[in-house]
Amino acid sequence: MPLDALATGLIETLTAALMMVVGLLPDSLAAPFEYRFMQRALLTSVLVGATCGLLSCFVVLKRWSLLGDAISHAVLPGVAIAYLLGWPFFVGAFVTGALTSLGIGAIERHTRIKSDAAMGLMFTAAFALGIVIISKITTSTHLMHILFGNVLGVQTPALILTLLASLVAVLTIWLAFRPLLLYTFDPQQAQALGFNVSAIHYGLILLLTLTIVASLETVGIILVVAMLITPGATAHLLTDRFGTMLAISVAVGVTSAVAGLVLSVRLDVASGGAIVLVASGLFLIALLAGPRHGLVARYWRRWRFRAS
Amino acid sequence: MEPPIADRVPALEINGLYAAYHQEPVLEDVSLSLPQGQWTAIVGPNGGGKSSLLSVVVGSLPPLRGEVRIFGRPALAQRQRGRIAYMAQQERMEWDFPISVRDTVMTGRFGMMRRDPLWQRLLPRRWANPAHRRAVEEALDDVDMLDMARRPIGALSGGQKKRVMLARALAQQAPILLLDEPLAGVDPPSEALIMASLERQRRAGRTLIMVTHDLPGARAHADQVLLINRTVIGMGAPETMLSDSMLARLAIGVPPTADKERHVAA
C-alpha cells in the first residue's frame, strides 16, 4: 500500500531527526535510545504530546474537560468489540467515542437533562459496557495497555495511526484557524458572521476523539484526559495571546511526554503515570511562578499595594 | 465586487415571524419594514422579544415561521457577505480568553476574510490583506481604544469592553448595524464615546437598529422607534411612540389594530 510506505518513510525521517537531537544529550540520557523500541516510544511521545497540547487549548477554553473525559472512557467498548471481531482497535474506539459524543449532544438538546449529567450518564454506561465485554474475553494484556497505556510497547501500526492523527490535527487547526478561534472565543459572533457553527462544533469534537484514540496506547484511557487539560491550563496561566498559548501548550505536552518516558525507563515505573505527573509538575510551577497570573506574582502585587 | 444595493429596498424586512425560546413563544406574528439609512430604536419590556428579534436576524434563534430579508435578500446570504454587523449583549462572554483588544476587533473581519485568496488566508496576519488591518485601526480609533490595542481584553473595564465590541462591529464596515443594548452597564465617558461613534455611522449613511432601555437617548438620537412586546405594538416617530399612552399600551402588550378588531367583533 503506497500510504503505508509513505507513512513508514515519514516515520524513518522523523526518527532520524529526533535521534540527531538525542545525540546532543549526555551519554547517560541518550544511551537507552539506541534500542528500536525506545526510538518508536520517543517519536510516539513527541507526537502525542504535541497533538494533545494543541487540542488542550480548545478543551480548556471551551470548558470541555468533562467532555474529554467522557469521550476517552467511551472508547473502551469500541476497543473491546474491535478485539472480539479482530479489527484494528482504533476503528472501534473512534466509532464508540464519536457515537457517545453525539448521544450526549442529543440528550442535552432534546431533554431537560443538563450537559454534565448527560455526559456522566453516557460515558459511565459506555465504560460499563466495555468492562462487561472485557470480563467475558478473559485475560488480555493488550486491553490492560489500553486502560493504562504503555508507550514502550507501541508497535508500528499504532505509531502510524498516531502520526496520521497528528497530521490531521495540525492541518485542520492551520486551515480552519480563524473559524476555530472565533467559535471558541465567541460562538454567537461566529454565527452572526455566517459561519456554520454546528459543523465547527462537531468537527472539533471529532478531532478531539481522534486525538484521544491516537493517545490511548501512550497514556491510556484513564489518564489521557490529563494530557487534554494540563498543557492548556498551564499555558493559560502563562500568556494572554491565543497563538502563544498554543505554542506553550505544545511545548508542555512534548516536554512532559518525553521527560515522562525517560523517567519511566530510568525508575522502571508506569509510563502513562510518569508522563501525567511531569505535566502536573509543570502546571504547579506555572501556578506558583507565572509572571502575571501566578500565585507568587499575585501575592507580591497585593503586598506591594498594601505597603504603598 | 459587491453588487450595489437598490435605494428603495428596505434595510430590514420581516414578514409573519414566529419564534420560541425554550418552548416559550417570544415573538408572534411580527411584521415590519425598516428603511435604509435610519436609526431605529427598539423599545419594549424585559422578556418582550427585543433581543430575540435580533437573534433571529443573526441566526442564533431559528424562527418557527416567517421570513427575514436584508436589503431584499435572505439574511444568511447577507451575513455571509459581511453586510450585517452585530453587537451582542455579551453577558455570556468568557473575558478570560487569551486575546488582545486589536485581535478581538480583527475577528469582526473574519467573515470577509473567507473571500480573500487562499494563500493569504494561510499566512499570518502581518502578510495578509492590508484592508483588514486598516479597517481595524480605524475602528479602534473611532471608539478611542487605540492606546489600549495591545491589552488583553479581560483587563478592560465594562465600558471599555463595550467600546471594543462596538469597534469590532464597526470594523466590518457593514451597511447595517444591529446593537443589543450598547449602553448597558457603561460608564458616562464611554457612553458619550459610543453615542458619538454611532452618530458618525448614521451620518455615513448606515442603517442602525438598536435595542435600548434608554428612552431619553432614543428620543434624542433615533429617527424612529419600534415598540415590541411579543408582537409589534407600534412604529413611528419617537415623539408619538414614546408618548404616555403608547408606553401604557406597550406595557400591556396591545397593538392599536387589536382594539379595532375588538370593536368590529362587538
Image (spheres, rainbow, N blue to C red):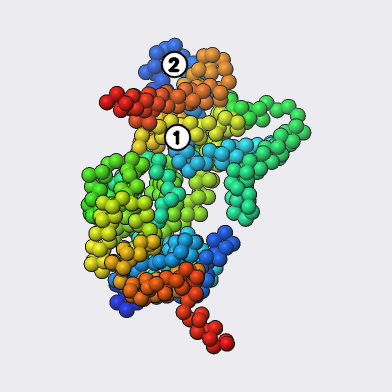
A31 over A218 or under it: above or below: above
Residue lying at the far top of the rendered structure:
A28
How many numbered dots are placed on residues in this image? 2
Q: Quadrant of the N terminus of chain A?
A: top right
Q: Residue at x 37, y 71 (%)?
A: B242
Counting from the top left corner in percent of width and height, residue B97 is at: 40, 42
Q: Nearer the viewer, mark 2 or mark 1?
A: 1
- Determine the image quadrant of residue A17: top left
Up the image or down, B24 lies above or below A205; here it is below
Residues tagged 2 and 1 counted as in contact (Cβ below 8 A): no
The percent position of residue B166, horizontal first and vertical second, equals 32, 55
Mark 2 is on which residue type?
Answer: Ala
Q: Which residue is mark 1?
A: A232
Q: Residue at x 35, y 47 (%)?
A: B158
Viewed as shown, does residue B125 lie left or right of A158? left
Foreground of the two, B30 or A243: B30
Q: Chain of mark 2?
A: A
Compared with residue B62, is residue A19 higher up or lower down, i.e. above or below?
Answer: above
Figure check: B47 above or below B264 = above
Determine the CA span between mark 2 and mark 1.
29 Å
**Residue B139: x percent and y percent?**
26, 54
Q: Does A90 sit left or right of B235 as displayed?
A: right
Which residue type carries mark 1?
A: Gly
Residue A45 in sight in this render: yes
View extreme (right): residue = A136
Q: Position of residue B171 (x, y in %)?
A: 29, 56
Residue beneath disc 2: A30
Circle 2 SS class? helix
